[in-house]
Image (cartoon, rainbow, N blue to C red):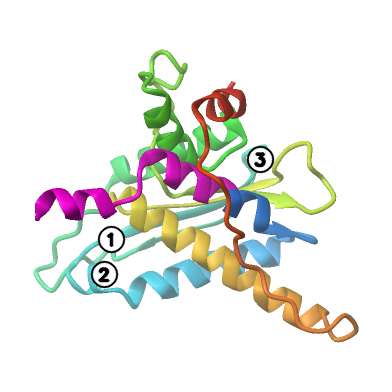
Amino acid sequence: MFSNIHSMLPTAAELASQTLVEEGSYRFPSFSAADAVTLGLSIRKRFRGTSRYAKGKGLVISVQTIAGQPLFACTVGDSGHLSGMSDISLDSWSALEGMINVVKRTGHSSYYVENGVATMGKTLKQMGLQGEFRVCGGAFPIWLENAPCCPIAIVACYSGSSQDDHRLVASTIRDYLNKMKKTNSSLDGPSVVTPSTAAPVTITQVRTNLN
């Protein structure tokens, strides 16, 4: 029974593939400081509505330019659970910065890099991602539609759960883009941003993307 459940779980290559498609799909026509604040507040609101927050889990959020200029930052759950305890500390911010460094180093989301490294079967040392880097999900690059050379900003959050943090950021970006497109599509008709399906990423593709 347990082997059947395990076989239903997505592989690292499948997760990397899905994340890469998200990166290609979730691109902005423009991105301002106001957008950064709205995204940050949206992530905060979504997390406060989760069972993880209700159980006392905390979160740190940062939105900054690719050059490191802060646009938004906040702590969620600094008061902790009803017991008064909190799992947010300076280490949380250190982990968040390490994830942001991964995006700056690779141009890809930290969740893609995490699963890409697993797909390749290499160590973080072999990939040159030690020290100031934190390879876990939660940091996502902001790309402009007409500027494919590099991302212009990074949206990141950290609660200690790689998959949950990535989903929180990616889904917030997706919904915000859909809202933007709905507002700007009065002439072109309705448009919705959804990740298309793609074949699993191969080891060669991962190696090319991360090198």
Sooner in the amino-acid sequence: mark 1 or mark 3: 1
Q: Are marks 2 and 1 in contact (CB under 8 Å)?
A: yes
Which residue is labeled 3 in the image?
66
**Residue 98: percent from the left, percent from the top?**
43, 34
Which residue is labeled 1 in the image?
58
Q: Secondary structure at mark 2?
A: helix
Q: Residue at x 51, y 45 (%)?
A: 17
Q: Is residue 23 left or right of residue 74?
A: right
Say what amino acid the circle numbered 1 marks.
Answer: Gly
Give the quarter of the figure containing the N terminus. bottom left
Sooner in the amino-acid sequence: mark 2 or mark 1: 2
* Residues drawn in magenta: 1-20
**Residue 191: percent from the left, percent from the top?**
74, 77
| Whether residue 1 is visible | yes
Q: Is residue 42 left or right of residue 56?
A: right
Q: Residue at x 59, y 51 (%)?
A: 21
Label 2 packing within 10 angstroms: few (<14), some (14-19), many (20+): some
| Whether residue 98 is visible | no
